[in-house]
Amino acid sequence: HIRGRRHPAGGRLPLPESVRSMFADEDEKPDDAEDGSQHGGRLRSFAHERGNWATYVYLPYSGDSDFDELVDLVLRRLCDVGLRMSKQEDFHISLSQTVVLRYHWINLFLQTLRERLGSYHRFNCFTNKVKVYTNQERTRTFLGLEATRGQQDLLGLVTEIDGAMQEFQLQTFFKDTSFHMSLAWCVGDLSDRFNQDLINQLQDVVDEFEDSPRLLRIHAEQLVCKTGHKLHPVPLR
């Protein structure tokens, strides 16, 4: 896909950026500029450019106070062994990579997603298996709960989302992905600190928590496409 700015028509010289910004449409402003201080030290993996929107699709999960208590118990167990991780601000299962979408593509991309997914039936999935992940650059570590039921339905969603991505020449999702909901994260690759004994301890916390089967069931009735800071619902049938 083309990430550069469009050339001006008719061979006219482009306006200086300082002048263009005075007349910028507020809706065309992308996600906030790259600033690690605003993201707990995290950095985006692609350069910020005006008119580019970081975009991804996910299945949201709204946990109640019992779920928050479960996550807090897991984090306390990590603190007991000297591992400090930050709780996720929101909980979800990712169904696409983060891609760069041009502003003028957003509405058509959303329309394509909704057309592809509008006939897909709602379903339940369960995320209850403790697993550790890193991002592609190995600059962040995540503690997550892997889906143990509903994987085929999730894979079906990804197939449709990938189809929409391909129509816009965008990157598709990872092959052989592990569908999961991240609970916490930290900067750096600390995956080697999570030995099997620690994983088993964390799994016991999850398994022994009262009503965990209810808490860890996700009812998939609507996906979300996030572009910049804007959330766009993508309902299932």
Image (cartoon, helix red, strand yellow):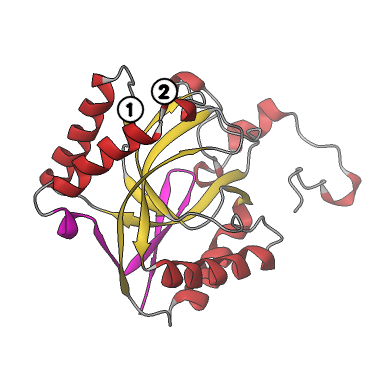
Q: Quadrant of residue 136?
A: top right
Residue 28 lies, in percent from the top left, at 56, 45
* Relative to 100, residue 177 above or below: below
Give the extent of the magenta segment.
212-237
Residue 124 shown left or right of residue 67 in the figure? right
Residue indicated by mark 1: 86
Residue 149's label in the rendered image is none
C-alpha distance separating marks 2 and 1: 9 Å
Residue 76 lies, in percent from the top left, at 21, 26
Residue 98 shown left or right of residue 49 in the figure? left
Residue 64 lies, in percent from the top left, at 14, 49
* Magenta stretch: dominant secondary structure: strand
For the residue pair 77 and 4, the one nearer the viewer reads as 77
Q: Which of the image's four quarters has the C terminus?
A: bottom left
Residue indicated by mark 2: 40
For the residue pair 71 and 88, the one nearer the viewer reads as 71
Would you say residue 175 is visible in this rendering?
yes
Whether label 2 touches label 1, CB < 8 Å? yes
Q: Residues within 10 Å of mark 1 (few under 14, many from 20)?
A: some
Q: Residue at x 41, y 31 (%)?
A: 195
